[in-house]
């Protein structure tokens, strides 16, 4: 990649929507900010900034889009890469065949996505799971108002079947839900578990204050075997995690996370973990060590640039 002498690489990370921190927070933006921070720490990188469709410009060397064309723009001049880590927006999880040839390289957050890209003709693919910035997501001083036995932090985009399998069984154990949109579930409102929206900057304190973090993937993530960033964010904060099953998550985290099929089994696993603080601490410590050793955004940034030959 050619750049002006001595100026270093200029990298843009493109999203369809930015500035979501004060509303229904997009996990994509949280990850983009974390990846941009990690890219700026790489040797030879002068700039790594997050842009939306109206502000992305052509005086960059590389653009990494978090959604493919036409949901993100293709700007003449910079090299183009796509990080396939979320479903198509229009139509939801629509075909990718027309988008794939437009990118020099495609990073895929799950092995099944690699297969989809290859089937659409993509040749340069790299498995690159989601992650978190350990300088932001780290153990911090617990806060009394955020202390709960179990927390689930997500906006409501789950099916009713998933709510019944992974949320309802934990209500008697003190589950607290942070995020927007859950008010449309009358039984959750009546249970008193809803805590409303939380700013991303407060999430490390939430994960540092609770006993256990619940992870429940959306249907798209489960169908495509894509572990979400929550696993990395909670892990980096030193939290013990109870998650629905996902083959790639189980490969990446091994026995440092307790995986469940939901229902009564989930409730029993939660009861066991809540009763054993030493076990929770051991799981959390080993999971964090695994992430910090090779699965942070700093590792991802280095792999991205090496794969692109820059």
Image: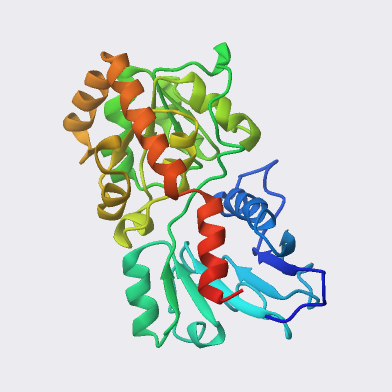
Q: Position of residue 268 (x, y in %)?
A: 19, 24
Q: Is residue 127 visible?
A: yes
In front of the other: 74 or 131? 131
Q: Quadrant of the N terminus?
A: bottom right
Q: How many marks?
A: 0
Coloration mode: rainbow
Q: Is residue 6 left or right of residue 190?
A: right
Q: Quadrant of the C terminus?
A: bottom right
Q: Position of residue 34 (x, y in %)?
A: 61, 49
Q: Is residue 307 left or right of residue 244?
A: right
Q: Is residue 89 visible?
A: no
Q: Using the image, determine if residue 237 lies above or below residue 5.
A: above
Residue 187 image-quadrant placement: top left
Q: Position of residue 273 (x, y in %)?
A: 27, 21
Q: Using the image, determine if residue 231 lies above or below residue 302.
A: above
In front of the other: 237 or 66? 237
Residue 223 image-quadrant placement: bottom left
Q: Is residue 182 left or right of residue 41?
A: left
Q: Position of residue 147 (x, y in %)?
A: 49, 16
Residue 144 image-quadrant placement: top right
For the point 60% across and 72% down, which residue is it? Answer: 71
């Amino acid at each position: 990649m050619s750049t002006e002498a001595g100026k270093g690489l200029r990298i843009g990370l493109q999203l369809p929507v930015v500035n979501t921190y004060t509303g229904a927070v997009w996990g994509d933006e949280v990850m983009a900010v974390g990846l941009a921070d990690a890219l700026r720490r790489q040797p030879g990188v002068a700039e790594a900034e997050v842009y939306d469709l109206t502000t992305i410009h052509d005086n960059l060397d590389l653009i990494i889009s978090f959604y493919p064309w036409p949901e993100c723009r293709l700007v003449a001049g910079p090299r183009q890469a796509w990080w396939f880590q979320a479903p198509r927006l229009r139509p939801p999880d629509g075909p990718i065949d027309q988008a794939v040839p437009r990118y020099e390289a495609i990073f895929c957050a799950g092995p099944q996505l690699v297969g989809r890209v290859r089937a659409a003709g993509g040749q340069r693919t790299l498995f690159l799971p989601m992650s978190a910035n350990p300088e932001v997501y780290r153990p911090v001083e617990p806060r009394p108002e955020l202390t709960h036995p179990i927390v689930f932090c997500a906006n409501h985009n789950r099916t009713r079947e998933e709510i019944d399998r992974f949320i309802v069984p934990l209500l008697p154990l003190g589950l607290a839900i942070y995020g927007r949109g859950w008010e449309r579930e009358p039984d959750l409102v009546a249970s008193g578990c809803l805590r409303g929206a939380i700013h991303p900057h407060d999430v490390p304190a939430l994960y540092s204050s609770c006993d256990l973090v619940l992870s429940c993937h959306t249907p798209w993530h489960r169908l495509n075997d894509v572990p979400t960033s929550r696993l990395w964010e909670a892990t980096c904060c030193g939290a013990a995690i109870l998650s629905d099953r996902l083959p790639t998550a189980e490969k990446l985290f091994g026995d440092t996370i307790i995986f469940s099929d939901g229902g009564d089994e989930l409730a029993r696993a939660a009861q066991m973990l809540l009763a054993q603080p030493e076990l929770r601490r051991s799981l959390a410590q080993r999971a964090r060590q695994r992430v910090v050793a090779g699965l942070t955004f700093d590792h991802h940034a280095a792999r991205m640039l090496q794969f692109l030959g820059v």
